Amino acid sequence: QVQLVESGGGLVQAGGSLRLSCAATRNIFSSVRMAWYRQAPGKQRELVAEITRTGLTNYADSAKDRFTISRDNAKNMVYLQMNSLKPEDTAVYYCYVLWPGGFDLWGQGTQVTVSS
């Protein structure tokens, strides 16, 4: 069974850092797109950052200059380094992977809570 498993969430004070990890049980080398989304209580899920097979990245305005997405094809991992965290970054963060042919997968989510 193909799975995405996130880890690295937790409670951090404003200004702190966290590194989220997403482990895939399927080879990600051929994946078209990998991304991190987040969903805060009462809000819609939103894109935080994405990275393509060729390494191109895109960030939400709220994440630019603070977050960095990266991938390690050899380890089937995708990461989100989050610095200078703010209380408004509090949300459940989800990993997403799209493979060729339209097969895609979501992780179960990891909670990030930033205290003021």
Image (tube, helix red, strand yellow):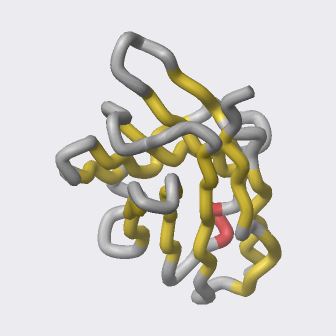
> Between residues 3 and 111, which one lies in front from this camera angle?
3
Q: Is 87 rendered above or below residue 94?
A: below
Task: Residue 22 in the image: state x and y as whole percent.
Answer: 61, 55
> Between residues 21 and 64, which one lies in front from this camera angle?
21
In screen coordinates, is 71 left or right of 109?
A: left
Query: Which residue lies at the image location 60% right of the left edge and 45% below the top edge?
Result: 24
Task: Residue 1 in the image: state x and y as whole percent.
Answer: 74, 27
Can you tell which quarter of the image residue 42 is in?
top right
Can you tell which quarter of the image residue 43 is in?
top right
Query: Which residue lies at the image location 59% right of the left edge and 83% below the top edge?
Result: 17
Quarter placement of the C terminus: bottom right
Task: Residue 57 in the image: state x and y as whole percent.
Answer: 25, 52
Task: Residue 81 in the image: state x and y as whole percent.
Answer: 49, 73
Query: Which residue lies at the image location 55% right of the left edge and 43% below the top edge?
Result: 37
Q: Is 84 rendered above or below residue 91?
A: below
Query: Which residue lies at the image location 44% right of the left edge and 42% below the top edge?
Result: 28
Q: Count every numbered label the image shows and give the total.
A: 0
